Image: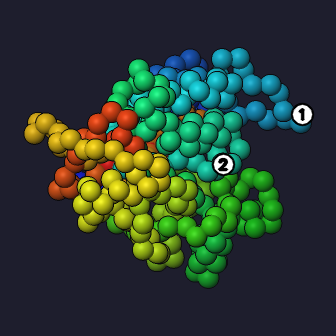
Amino acid sequence: MARYVDEGVEVLVVTCTGGERGSILNPALKDRPEIEANIAEIRRHEMDRARAILGVQQSWLGFVDSGLPEGDPLPPLPEGCFALTPVEEGVRRLVAEIRRFRPHVITTYDENGGYPHPDHVRCHEISVAAFDAAADPDAFQEAGEPWQPLKLYYDVGFSVDKMEALHQAMISRGLESPFEEWRRGARSGPATCARRRSPRRVSVADWFERRDAALLAHATQVDPNGWFFAMPLDIQREVWPTEDFELARSLVDSQLPEDDLFAGIRRRSPRDVRAAAGRCCGHRQRVRARSPARSAWPSSCCSASRATSCSSRCPGICAASAKTSRLTARPAGMPRRQLRPGSPHRSRCRMRLSRMRLSRM
């Protein structure tokens, strides 16, 4: 997110929950009654600090954290939590954010939620549904004029290939690897270690310090002496200098391999991008010029051009919000156009809180 912000992209992080049931993972802050009694407020302040470090925008969908059920059998989820809220309600709130922000790109969790946290999975579900519903003029008419994001990505996080490469690099330098337990099949290793299809890799080595600072700003949710911070940044830059994503949906063509979430969107005229969206949606829409007071192309909130992120809050992952999606908006200098109501083209648009990012250029 920090890279795209520095490039002039607007990024919105959409946070689904307040992290009310999230564990306190920082040993220095555990067993402190004043923290436990005000955890939701504390995590809002943590989000404010992380947001300022990254330079992103952030909004809350207002759902209640489901917690991470543990045990065999698993206990029932608490009544009224995000994961038990009807999917349609989550989609409705997210559609409103998309139509307001109008992102080009959205990033969110994969179908497994990165790991099977119920709020992460629900965040995925509403993100995928909202990607289409935001452009449907018959859906959620009270949520604003239709807008179509152009690309939807899943965050890959720690893939098998990445973890193995970093492990071998640490061992070859005589350092203790934080991935040793994972390699032995221990369940205590990092959560997201799937092998995803054809990941898109975005170079972010120059922003690793800012990434870590934003993560540490979520003080109750991370252990500053934990496994993630045990990997020297110089090794990370040398071995795996990228953040990886899986392209789930695209209404534009781009050349492979992609190294930019806005591939296929940058350097294309609004007319070309509009035509691509029209082909996917099965209909064309006319475009009308936007008021000179506002630029016309969408930004995003999940990670791409104008960005927005949507997440729910649970302790542990890094970025600027709870379970989220990111919407990414349009890059600086790219013209924006406003579409008529019903156009499939209007849209703008992560931590262990459930979220998504929306981005726009």
- Mark 1 vs 2, N-terminal side: 1
Write down the residue under mark 1: 73
**Three-letter code, disc 2:** Glu
Task: Assign a secondary structure to mark 2.
Answer: loop
Q: Which mark is residue 252?
A: none
**Three-letter code, disc 1:** Pro
Rounded to the nearest angstrom, the CA distance separating label 1 from label 2 is: 22 Å
Residue at the far right: name it. 73
Vertical comparison of 171 with 190: above or below: below
Write down the residue under mark 2: 111
Q: Left or right: 150 with respect to 338?
A: right
Mark 2, residues whose alpha carbon is within 10 Å: few (<14), some, or many (≥20)? some
Expressed as whole percent of the image width and height from the top left, the position of residue 82 reads 62, 26
Query: What residue appears at the point 89 percent right and 36 percent down from the top-left corner?
Result: 72
Expressed as whole percent of the image width and height from the top left, the position of residue 141 reads 42, 24
Q: Image quadrant of residue 33?
A: top right
**Towards the viewer: 131 or 243:** 131
